[in-house]
């Protein structure tokens, strides 16, 4: 009995010692442990709180290590935060720029066009030696809007010597790309063949103009572009050969993984992303009060009409989000939910929408794709990978050019 009591006392003393050690460790390392747990939870979460994450990163001795881990989470909101943070800090932190250069170069090939734009801007701002490679990559993209992004970035260089890089885009099948090219050549050469940016986002002349005026403007644009082509053929020997410039970036097409989701349509039927496995899926985040969203609807209708069952278009309504913000939602009453659904249904019926419309009352799906930047479009490939995210519309032909290049 005495020996048993001694054994119990020994175990109690050992447990007390362990408790004391744990208590001391908690006092000494508790904050570090809490921060580590917070960061891991943030990486695993579908979205990220910008203010809290920036506070966390700025408290670290080596911020880039944490930014890199956040980028490698392969989630759209996380990558957007990384690029935003770098844009805001590299001006006063040269060491951060040097460490982040490889990541920024990767970002110029990201699925998110907004991330690409920010990364390219940083490379130009820092006069990075690989900026031309990154710009050439955009000029070869299958999305006409991204090719125009490459042209805009070249415009910022203000050096006519780069003209051979963009001259080939005069023959671009998309007139807006050729028009942007002609505009840049006019700026660099001070020649003028009457080409102006008269096309709106639908690829037509100014809204409200008659068919005759529209046709005349388009004919004038095409004639001016043909004159630019002739000028280039006559003067290309005055410029360095294309082979003398850095080659475009190369490598596999970037994609991001995505997990499934379930939302109800306006009739209450549950629709899953997995239902469309094997075909491209275009997610269109919109609201009834967003003018740009409403302007995009006819293009999506036309796209669905042309491609039919070859594409699934899911118009995801974020009308429950206050002015598009995808956080801090107040709980809606059943009456408010019913009113919102009626409003969305009315727009669907008035516009003759021929694709699936879903309701995301808590923006749980919208948050994952940062869908509050209205209208946001996300293209998911047949195998469930994210291929492209962009804000703002495309013409029907622009949408088709993107979709047809998704495998």
Image: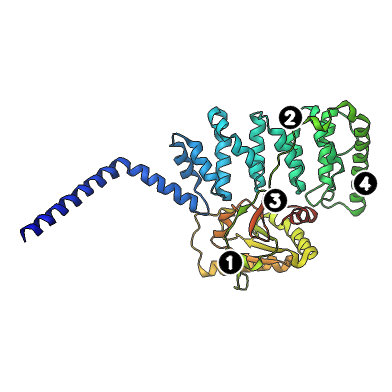
Local secondary structure at mark 3:
loop
Q: CA distance from mark 4 to mark 3?
A: 27 Å
* Measured Cα–Cα span from mark 2 to mark 1: 46 Å
Say whether disc 1 or disc 4 marks the residue closer to the N-terminus: 4
Label 1 Cα crowd, 10 Å radius (few <14 / some 14-19 / many 20+): some
**Residue tagged by mark 2?**
157
Which residue is denoted by mark 4 in the rendering? Answer: 219
Q: Which residue is mark 3?
A: 392
Q: Earlier in the sequence, mark 1 or mark 3?
A: 1
Q: Residue at x 63, y 34 (%)?
A: 122
Q: Nearer the viewer, residue 365 or 257?
A: 257
Residue 257 image-quadrant placement: bottom right
Distance between mark 4 and mark 2 Cα atoms: 31 Å
Mark 4 element type: helix
Q: Which mark is residue 263?
A: 1
Q: Quadrant of the C terminus?
A: bottom right
Image marks 1 and 4: residues in contact by CB distance under 8 Å = no
Q: Position of residue 396 (x, y in %)?
A: 79, 56
């Amino acid at each position: 009995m005495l020996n048993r009591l001694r054994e119990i006392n020994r175990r109690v003393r050992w447990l007390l010692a362990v408790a004391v050690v744990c208590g001391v460790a908690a006092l000494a390392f508790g904050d570090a442990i809490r921060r580590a747990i917070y960061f891991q939870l943030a990486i695993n979460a579908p979205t990220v709180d910008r203010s809290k994450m920036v506070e966390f990163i700025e408290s670290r001795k080596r911020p880039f290590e944490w930014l890199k881990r956040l980028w490698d989470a392969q989630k759209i909101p996380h990558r957007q935060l990384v690029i935003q943070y770098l844009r805001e800090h590299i001006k006063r932190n040269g060491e951060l720029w040097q460490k982040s250069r490889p990541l920024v170069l990767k970002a110029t090939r990201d699925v998110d066009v907004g991330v690409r734009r920010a990364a390219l801007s940083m490379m130009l701002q820092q006069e990075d030696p690989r900026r031309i490679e990154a710009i050439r990559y955009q000029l070869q993209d299958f999305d006409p809007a991204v090719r125009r992004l490459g042209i805009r970035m070249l415009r910022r260089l203000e050096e006519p010597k780069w003209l051979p890089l963009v001259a080939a885009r005069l023959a671009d099948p998309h007139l807006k790309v050729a028009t942007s090219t002609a505009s840049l050549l006019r700026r660099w050469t001070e020649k003028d063949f009457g080409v102006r940016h008269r096309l709106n986002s639908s690829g037509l002349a100014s809204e409200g103009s008659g068919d005759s005026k529209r046709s005349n403007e388009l004919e004038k644009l095409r004639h001016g572009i043909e004159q630019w082509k002739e000028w280039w053929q006559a003067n290309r020997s005055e410029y360095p050969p294309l082979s003398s410039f850095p080659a475009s970036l190369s490598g596999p097409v970037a994609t991001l993984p995505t997990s499934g989701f379930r939302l109800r349509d306006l009739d209450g039927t549950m629709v899953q992303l997995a239902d469309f496995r094997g075909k491209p899926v275009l997610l269109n985040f919109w609201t009834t009060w967003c003018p740009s969203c409403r302007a995009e609807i006819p293009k999506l209708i036309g796209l669905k009409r042309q491609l039919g069952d070859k594409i699934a278009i899911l118009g995801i309504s974020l009308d429950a989000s206050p002015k598009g913000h995808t956080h801090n939602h107040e709980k809606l009453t059943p009456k408010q939910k019913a009113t919102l659904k009626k409003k969305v249904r009315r727009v669907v019926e008035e516009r003759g929408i021929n694709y699936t419309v879903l309701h995301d009352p808590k923006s749980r799906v919208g948050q994952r794709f940062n869908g509050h930047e209205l209208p946001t479009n996300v293209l998911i490939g047949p195998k469930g990978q994210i291929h492209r995210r962009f804000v703002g519309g495309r013409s029907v032909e622009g949408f088709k050019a993107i979709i047809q290049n998704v495998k």
